[in-house]
Image (cartoon, rainbow, N blue to C red):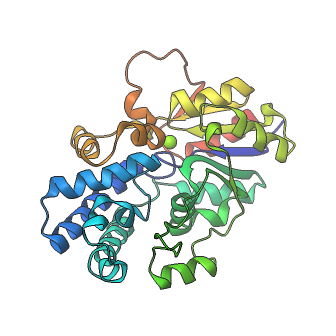
Amino acid sequence: MPIRLVVTDMDNTLYSWVDYIVPAVEAMVDAVQRATGFPRIKVVQSLKEVYTKYESNEYPYALQESSLFREFPEFSSFDKLIIEPARIAFSEARRKYLKPYKSVLETLAALKERRIVVVALTDAPRNPAEQRVKRLGVDQHLAALYTMPGFQFPAGPDGAALVAPDILQKEVRGEYRAACPTVELPRELEKPNPQGLKRILATYSVDPKDVLVIGDSVKKDIAVAQTLGCHDVWAEYGTYVSLEYRERLDIISSNAITRRHANNVFEGGQQSISPTHTVSNYGQLLGLVDRLG
Ligand SMILES: [Mg+2]
């Protein structure tokens, strides 16, 4: 039977999460430091506290929830003088460093042409996951995007949203949404829980034998594929993180966050699970789809 469905991981499979998050958060820290004159350690630790609470360093409203805001509690000046430059710095770095790996877009287009359904399954929260597929143009090729629950806007003591009015309006107009449908899975379905993948198989009524799962994490992506009897493909190229980036990531990101987005960082050495197929670039997926079909 030919492959009918490809389930793809996102972080470190479609693009390098580490290569973009490190400079983007660092740029944001620089901007906050310039705006407040605070020492770097104070800025980093106040952000990290919020990131840790939400288990994501892409939590877009980190500053208004951080201890920094408690020092400057009037929102509109805090927004203009601190949040806005930080947001611009983050998104400029993201624009520069968030790039799809070689042959990702071409491969997704080719799969679509072969009428193979492609669904993304990520442990990232909905909002940043949607942002990334949108910015990369990946959403054009996806039948659906399965994520962890999205973030809500933080609220002030009076219940009003603590975000700039233009962001609120953009959210209401759906400008942050991806072109493909999005499904938020409950938190406990984070990989390696196979229930997320199982739900996808049920939704598309496909036999596990006709499904190929690709991802960089052996303990998450390969494990869920093997548990359900799908073909598993290890995106080994996504596992290379330089020591320098690893060290810079440790400064801005807690282990719980790194585990969610780049679990492979912790997966060195002997593994109890061994991948059935390994690719050194995303484009090799096409050859595999042909061979397995
Ligand atoms: Mg990954």
Residue 42 position, x and y percent, is 18, 55
Residue drawn where x is 51% and y is 60% of the image: 128
Residue drawn where x is 23% and y is 37% of the image: 243
Can residue 130 be seen in the rendering of this structure?
yes
Q: Quadrant of the N terminus?
A: top right
Residue 31 position, x and y percent, is 22, 70
User: Farthest right residue?
Assistant: 205
Q: Quadrant of the C terminus?
A: top right
Residue drawn where x is 15% and y is 57% of the image: 40
Q: Quadrant of residue 93?
A: bottom left
Q: Nearer the viewer, residue 234 or 186?
A: 186
In screen coordinates, is 8 left or right of 115? left
Residue 22 position, x and y percent, is 30, 53
Is 103 placed above or below 187 here? below
In screen coordinates, is 39 left or right of 175? left
Can residue 3 be seen in the rendering of this structure?
no
